[in-house]
Image (cartoon, rainbow, N blue to C red):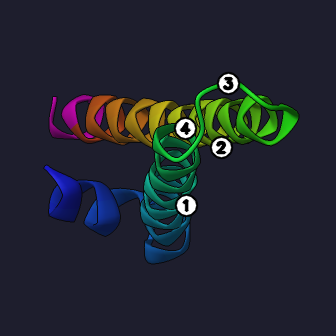
Amino acid sequence: MFFELAKITGVKLFRWCIYGYILCFIALSTTLYMLLNSFWITDEIRYGFGITIIIFVITQILYFISWNRINIIQEEQKSKES
């Protein structure tokens, strides 16, 4: 699935999707580590969750843009074949 996405949509957009998922994983891991080392939810943890959610939303937007491009390209190919 990911390789088809990279082939059709272009490597640059695919790389940003992967980078977004990596950043989201790092931010979530850091936030959970901070949460496990404290008993109260501090401002840093709340900001960490906020940043994680923002990164995840941006990544999902890029991912859906990529899939939309795949559908458009596939429809164009079907219309050319007909």
- Looking at the rendered structure, the kind of residue marked 3 is Trp
Above or below, 12 relative to 38: below
> In the image, is residue 37 part of the stretch drawn in magenta?
no
Q: Earlier in the sequence, mark 3 or mark 4?
A: 4
Q: Nearer the viewer, mark 3 or mark 4?
A: 3
- Looking at the rendered structure, the kind of residue marked 4 is Leu
Q: Earlier in the sequence, mark 4 or mark 1?
A: 1
Q: Which residue is mark 2?
A: 55
Q: Nearer the viewer, mark 4 or mark 1?
A: 4
Q: Are marks 4 and 2 in contact (CB under 8 Å)?
A: no
Task: Name the foreground residue: 32 vs 41.
Answer: 41
Q: Which residue is mark 1?
A: 23
Task: Name the foreground residue: 2 vs 50.
Answer: 50
Specify the label residue 35 is tagged with. 4
Q: Are marks 2 and 1 in contact (CB under 8 Å)?
A: yes
> In the image, is residue 81 part of the stretch drawn in magenta?
yes
What is the distance, in whole Å, between disc 4 and disc 1 at their CAs?
18 Å
What is the distance, in whole Å, between disc 3 and disc 4 at their CAs?
8 Å
Residue drawn at x 58%, y 53% is 27
Mark 3 nearby-residue class (10 Å; few <14, some 14–19, many ≥20): few
Q: Secondary structure at mark 3?
A: loop
Q: Earlier in the sequence, mark 2 or mark 1?
A: 1
Task: Name the foreground residue: 76 vs 36.
Answer: 36
Q: Secondary structure at mark 1?
A: helix
Q: Nearer the viewer, mark 3 or mark 1?
A: 3
Q: Earlier in the sequence, mark 4 or mark 2?
A: 4
- Looking at the rendered structure, the kind of residue marked 1 is Leu
Task: Name the foreground residue: 22 vs 35.
Answer: 35
Rendered location of residue 54, percent (x, y): 72, 34
Q: Secondary structure at mark 4?
A: helix
